[in-house]
Amino acid sequence: MAVLKKLSVTAALVAAACLPAGAQSARAHAHRTVATQSAVAQAEFDRGLGMLYAFNVGEARLAFKAAETADPHAAVAYACEAVADTIDINLPSTSAGEARGATAVARGRASASDASGDDRALLEAVAVRYDLSKPLKQRYVAYFSAMQQYADTHASDGMAHTLAAYAGWNAVDLLTDGSRQLVPSAKTMLDDLSAAVALDPDDLGAHHLLIHFWEGAGHPERALPDANYLAGLTYDPGQSHLPHMAGHTYARVGNYDALVAVNEAAVHYDEAYSQLGNGDGQRYMQLYHDHDVGFVLYGLTTVGRDAEARTFAAKESAFERGLLALRLHDGSRAAALLPATSAMGVVAEVRSGDLAAADRDLAVLAKAGTDDAAIALPRAVIERAKHEDDAAVRDYRIALSKQGNDLGDPKNSWSTPVGEGLGATLLEAQRYPEAQAVFERELVRYPNDPHLFFGLAEALKAQGKDDTAARRSYTDAWRGEHALTLADLG
């Protein structure tokens, strides 16, 4: 336990850098009173709820099952065990998950038939999600409706409001309309989350979903209070996704130091959790570990803290080290670490100077039936290296279109940022007004990025325009040992 105690202190110090002066760090805790006489059932339920809200659904299922063992009549534990296979909005439904959820509901109905009416009502609301006779999308909508009804009739139950909001995520196709206004269903979700936080300001699940919500709605800055709250806590091993989530907001507002700090903390939690075993929870959270690592490397390299990035990546996977090498334009190292017949492997070959190998492996990808838009980026990188500017611009635009608004991870292709590459190619082609427009648009998506400020300054200078403000923003944000050049972009 000494390792975990040290970890908590370290994470608290790291998180403190992200908080307003005078803010205190506290331990994350989730609680909802369960109708049980068993202290073990209550404690395991609360542990499961904390893991559920951290998207550690493997550990959450184990905790809820422990609560059921301690009190087989605790209907709410069966309900939340079933919810575990629905709550991670980042992952699609699976047949195994559908079967697990339906089984949990059936066990709850059989074992907790004498539970309170309120708890059985929650179980039945969740059961709507697992009516396997109906199409999945239809079940999403019905589940959202059922959870809304439950939350409406249990207005003082913060967990009910939080779970009702999560139920809406897959039921609502878009959070905003053509005018970027919240659609009615999204407003319902926001009402749920607002009610949950009003009832319990420490509701981890509500703060978590508010970050996703405002990111998806195009107003990530509105989740800053939620990000600061999650950043300021210390966590149990297995809850690393919660501090990571603060990094989503910090990325969107351009606070790269805070982005790095909270994700370094998340990686430390990952490591401590893995030391405890290799159970369902650890195997599940491994899906997120590289995600946390990628955020750290993204933040460090964006502002030029490259030596720190290399040190940090040294203990990580070859793939992550390969992506870092790509971002730092170390083509030979990237080519040695990344699979050749992959999009990033092709880019690595270009940057190592082996255009023949890049052409060959791109052809292999195309012949294998890889989606044309998916290989537009490596194709553009090849064309840029060959000075085939018009073709490169076309393919960069295809890749950027595929990326869309990039509402998920920041710089979804952080090791080879697409818009940045497009802007650099336009500069090289002397299409300066177009380059200016690209860099200005990318700075809206990725504020305070010195690479983008540098590109914008170069585009303005080439047109004889005043580049003073853009140049100053670049130098203020950049902490690299060497000044950026056009070759460093993209």
Image (cartoon, rainbow, N blue to C red):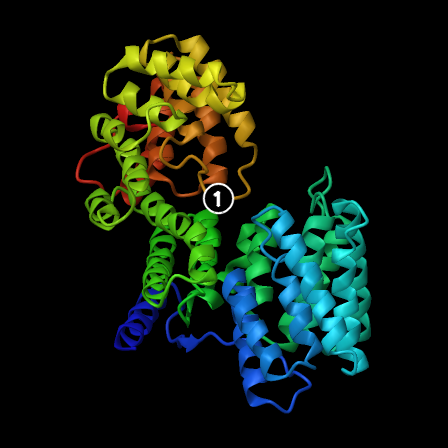
Indicate the quadrant containing the C terminus: top left, top right, bottom left or bottom right. Answer: top left
Relative to the observer, which residue lies in front, 139 or 161?
139
Relative to the observer, which residue lies in front, 467 or 281?
281
x%, y% of residue 179? 72, 39
In the displayed structure image, the side of residue 34 where residue 240 appears, left or right = left
Q: Residue at x 47, y 66 (%)?
A: 230
Asked whether residue 44 appears in the rendered view, the answer is yes
Q: Is residue 353 above or below residue 222?
A: above
x%, y% of residue 13? 30, 69
Give the SS element for disc 1.
loop
Relative to the observer, which residue lies in front, 316 or 124?
124
x%, y% of residue 379? 42, 16
Asked whether residue 151 appears in the rendered view, the answer is no
Q: Residue at x 23, y 42 (%)?
A: 306
As shown in the figure, which amino acid type bears the numbered disc 1? Asp
Q: Quadrant of residue 109?
A: bottom right
